[in-house]
Amino acid sequence: MNYMHKSIEELHEDLINGQVTSEDLVKEALEKTHEVQEKCNAFVTILDDAKPGDVTDNLLSGIPFGIKDNYSTKDILSTGSSNTLKDYVPFFNATAVENLYKAGAIPVNKTVMDEFGMGGTGTTGHTGAVKNPWDLSRSCAGSSAGSACAVASGVYPYALGSDTGDSIRKPAAYCGIVGYKPTYGIISRYGLFPFASSLDHCGVFSRNVRDAAIVVDAMKGIDKNDMTSWDSSNIHLLESLNGDVKGKKVCYIKEICDIKNYENPTEELKLHLENFMNVLENIKKLGIVVEEVSVDKKLLDAEPSVYVAISCAEATSNMSNLTGIIFGPRGSGANINEVMMDHRTHGFSPLIKRRFVIGSYILQKENQERYFKNAQRVRRLLVDTWKKLYETYDAVILPVGSGPAKHLDGSKDILTKDTAVLEEHMQIGNFGGFPSITIPDGFINDLPVALNITGNVYDDANVLNIAYAIESQMNFKNQIAKEVK
Amino acid sequence: MNNFTKELVDSLAEKLLIGLTEEENQMVLDEFAIIDENLGKLEIDGLENVEPMTHCLDDFYCTLREDIAEESIPIEDLLRNSDQTEGREIEVPKVVGE
């Protein structure tokens, strides 16, 4: 009998009743890991020697899970999917991981990502591209591609992700599962490889909203090792899910959702937006008030560049410690500079290298005002615009991306002039540290599509409850990817 | 207009200690042209008066830890990931006197 398709609460009940053991679950998760690796290339490391754990009152005890490879895991290879750290084995655990260990959770693999989280295709990791379990010719998006793929494939009920610009919420959409990035700082980032510190968030993939709440309840907490973490002991996400959303108000943005804004829209985009508007009509039956709002198009259009400017600048600084001297494979050369240059030139992928150069240019004293400071100013204007919306609405609800998963051969990850705000709007959730969750909302050409719900900071319980109610109204929770093409 | 040129890209890459191919250099130029155009055309009255946003949480209050000494990480653990060590030290090419 198989169990890994079940929810956390169902698995816990089976464990408590003695219907299954932790050993059985670990064995099944590892078998599935190998199957998925063969098909989708989702894992950097498979922990074949994973040991079962005790089953306690904690819902996560004895249950397997996966960890994105940019979380430090003591005595377990942690590469960030980069050649610069291809043999790196940390001597400590990330706090979020440690908190899950304390809950009794059992790690069974480390998942592939875009190198150091800097990408949105799942194709730039040093072990190769991750394939979408619904259609192997398509991308999982990124950067948390392997975690999304594994959860969607039924390897385990949940896996850890990180999200700097939508790296949990976009892959969740492409894989037909739930992706939740909570408020900035509710989960400690200690031990998460830094990409852009003012935008980096920890979070989770699951197949339903309740599971996401359970996992973040266990991961969160103030941490003396992360000065940006805060005390959330009064927030109980699972307990706050009651599905009562009568009178809640959500808004969608005309400039993003109206098909008339797009020149020559694809058939997939038309269907995606049509489906989204149908879902909005349906959720009114739950008692949710849905309204259209308008946001300055010029401000929205600047958003993708603001993200690139800030993230590149912060990444350039954060990754200057990757030299191959203290850790990582040692480069060769006649002097110390040549040794470091050899390590960095051959270790980083082209995508990362060009982002470093852009970040470095932006940080030059003579350019800071025009690029870096202006990007930070526009960041504030965007966040203030969203906060103004939250004075009236509980959440902003928007479609994710321009349709289902893109073909792998089209995943270039280059910022182009026609980059639609539709593809990138979830980055505003990172600008403001807003709690933000993606849930599946339909299928186009047999492939999943999704919507995103984003609320004000600290209002995670409200955002999750709205997501929980909407999820309950649809038929897409707990779905496992079925290869369709 | 930005003054982002091929030579400047190579110069920045060298300072960052990374080598770029011709193709990679061109990709940087192409991508940056779009960023420059998008950020440059943002004409918002009073943008210069907006306080740059450097952190997600406006109400964040930093609490300092108590100044209590804690056990240090064993040096063997710290050295474990370096490819070249000698005793309790990391070995590097000679720097002084170069």
Image (cartoon, rainbow, N blue to C red):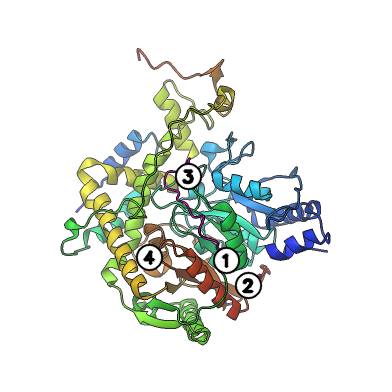
Q: Amino acid at mark 1?
A: Val
Front tag of 1 and 4: 1
Marks 4 and 2: which is nearer the front? 2
Which residue is at a point 45% across and 82% down the rendered structure image?
Answer: A247
State whether discs 3 and 1 lie on one chain: yes
Looking at the image, which residue sits at the far top?
Answer: B97
Q: CA distance from mark 3 to mark 4?
A: 22 Å
* Label 1 Cα crowd, 10 Å radius (few <14 / some 14-19 / many 20+): many
Q: Residues within 10 Å of mark 2 (few under 14, many from 20)?
A: many
Res A399 visible: yes
Are the residues tagged 2 and 1 within 8 Å (C-beta)? yes
Query: Which dot marks residue A419?
Result: 4
Query: What's the CA distance linking mark 2 and mark 1?
Result: 8 Å
Which tag, 2 or 1, sits closer to the chain's start? Answer: 1
- Snapshot quadrant of residue A365: top left
- Residue identified by numbered label 1: A178
Are dots 2 and 3 on a single chain? yes
Residue A236 among those drawn in magenta: yes
Q: Which chain's residue wears label 4?
A: A
Q: Amino acid at mark 3?
A: Ser
What secondary structure is marked by label 3?
loop
